[in-house]
Amino acid sequence: MILSSKDRYGIIAMFDLAVQQGERPVPLVELSQKHNISVSYLEQLFAQLRRAGLVKSRRGPTGGYFLGRDPSDITINDVVKAIRYGEESFSEFPRGDAASEGLKLWENFSHRMHRMLDEISLSDVLRSIETGQIVHYPSAARAHGDKSAKLN
C-alpha cells in the first residue's frame, strides 16, 4: 500500500478539522486556500468522508465541515479506507501465474500497513504535534512501557 496524493490530502484535511474540533465548521474554501487544493477536488474527498461518517457538514454562511466522531475514534486507516471506497484491491487480482507470488508479498505488506494505520488516531497525531513527541503504536508502547518517545 502506498499513500496516494488523494490519501494525503484527505489525511491533511481531517487533521485540520481535528485542530478546529469544537470551535467552528471549516469551509472547504479555507482548506483549498491553505493547502492549494481545488475546491472541487475537496468536494469529492469530503463526499467520501461524509459517506463514511467521518465528517458532518453545516450549510449556510457559517457552514463548513467538522469531524463526525471524536478524533480519538478516527484512525488514519479510516480516512484512507473512506477515500479509497470502491477502488480495486490487490485481493481482486487473478491468481495462478508467477506474478501471484509478488502479489502475495505486496498483499502482506499492504495488510501490515493498514494494521499500522489502524493504530494511529487523529488524537495521536494532534498529541504528537502538540508535545513534539512521536506517538508510538499501542503494541510498541506496551512493549516499551510508554506512549511516546522524544524526537531526535
Image (cartoon, helix red, strand yellow):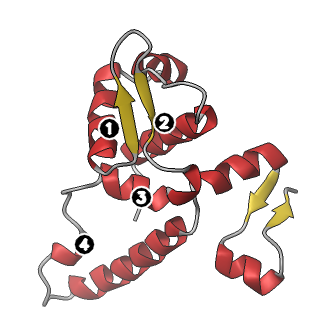
State whether residue 143 is above or below residue 58: below
Separation of marks 4 and 2 at Cα, in angstroms: 27 Å
* Residue 121 x %, y %: 57, 58
Give the labeled residue for mark 2.
13
Is tag 3's residue or tag 2's residue first in the polypeptide sequence? 2
Whether residue 133 sits left or right of residue 101 in the image: it is right
Callout 4, which amino acid?
Phe
Is tag 4's residue or tag 3's residue first in the polypeptide sequence? 3
The one of 107 and 40 positioned closer to us in this rendering: 40
State whether residue 18 is above or below residue 141: above
* Residue depth check, mark 4 versus mark 3: number of the one nearer the observer: 3
Whether residue 127 sits left or right of residue 83 in the image: it is right
Callout 1, which amino acid?
Leu
The one of 144 and 62 positioned closer to us in this rendering: 62
Is tag 3's residue or tag 1's residue first in the polypeptide sequence? 1
| Element on which disc 1 rests | helix
Mark 1 and mark 2 in contact (Cβ < 8 Å)?
yes
Give the labeled residue for mark 1.
45
Question: What residue lies at 41% left-to-right and 42% top-to-bottom?
Answer: 5
